[in-house]
Amino acid sequence: MPRFLLLIIIFLSTNVFAENTNLATNEQETDVVEFSELEHRIVELSGLLSLSEQVKTSAQYIISQSTVDAEKSEPAGESALVGINHAQHFGIAQSLSKRWIETEWENRLLTFIATLDKKEQQQIANDLSQKTIQSARAKEKAAIRNQSTAEYLMYMNKLEQRPPAASRWKLVESLDAHSFFSALIVKTRERVYAEISSQVEGWQPPIGWKQEAEKEVLEFLFYAYRKTSNPDLAKIANSYQRPALQSFLTKIQAEL
């Protein structure tokens, strides 16, 4: 099975999604709500806008895989896989675009953040502004850019052949848990899979996909922090444990 982390921006064929992005944008240009500079800053600091691309990339990947797998499967019988045709592809893209194009997702985030009182908003912004968190996000962005490189693939092979010590695993798992990294990945994929299931009768998501997603996230984090010492990794995980930030991320997960 090819390794890919769907949060990472892999620009697959986007023609159908591009068409529906324009359609959804035109439909949503009627009402403009003003949000505060602080609310916009929280969205920027959080990096949550990338989940919009996560949805598109997830849908494109699973649709292409379902089409390929169905073509390879038996034409009839219990072993036959349910494929996704072009009309269904278009319908899925149209539905997801209305809710998950970046402008709509940003508006949903801002609308939610606006429900929080100003004191809580300021605390969340302060928490996200920590140098530790911003430095960590820079490392993750750099890892994202490297994911298609030979170096990244070599590291993944090395990781599989020589797993890190248990203490290192615990630190990476702690970072993942407190940053909600894999939790948000899984939640967005759930939304994509639910939409596909609703439009394609008999379609089922891949067996064990949640466990695979969580594994992919951990592997990605191992790469992103491969040069980070255990004490520094512990500091990064601890920086996410501030009450306001944990409450915010928990609510965002529910909002998805």
Image (cartoon, grey):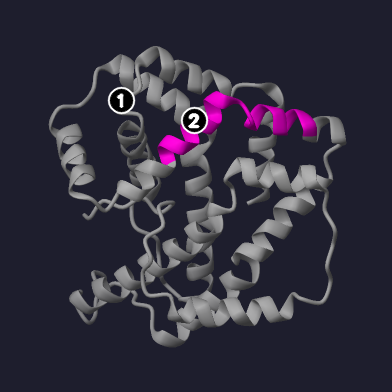
Q: Is residue 129 left or right of residue 170?
A: right
Q: Secondary structure at mark 1?
A: loop
Is 129 included in the stretch rendered in magenta? yes
Mark 2 is surrounded, within 10 Å at the Cα level, by few (under 14), some (14 to 19) or many (20 or more) other residues, namely few
Q: Is residue 11 left or right of residue 188?
A: left
Work out how far the residue at label 2 is from the one at label 1, CA to CA, in angstroms. 13 Å
The answer, for residue 88, to whether it is visible in the render is yes
Q: Secondary structure at mark 2?
A: helix
Circle nearer the N terminus (2, 1): 2
Q: Amino acid at mark 2?
A: Ser
Q: Amino acid at mark 1?
A: Lys
Question: Which residue is drawn at the image coordinates 24% and 17% (left, top)?
Answer: 165
Residue 86 image point, x, y percent: 41, 86
Front residue of 72/166: it is 166
Furthest residue in direction top, as rendered: 231
> Magenta segment range?
122-140
Question: Which residue is drawn at the image coordinates 39% and 60% (left, top)?
Answer: 205
Name the residue tied to disc 2. 135
Front residue of 133/157: it is 133
Q: Which mark is residue 227?
A: 1
Residue 33 image point, x, y percent: 84, 62
Is 94 included in the stretch rendered in magenta? no
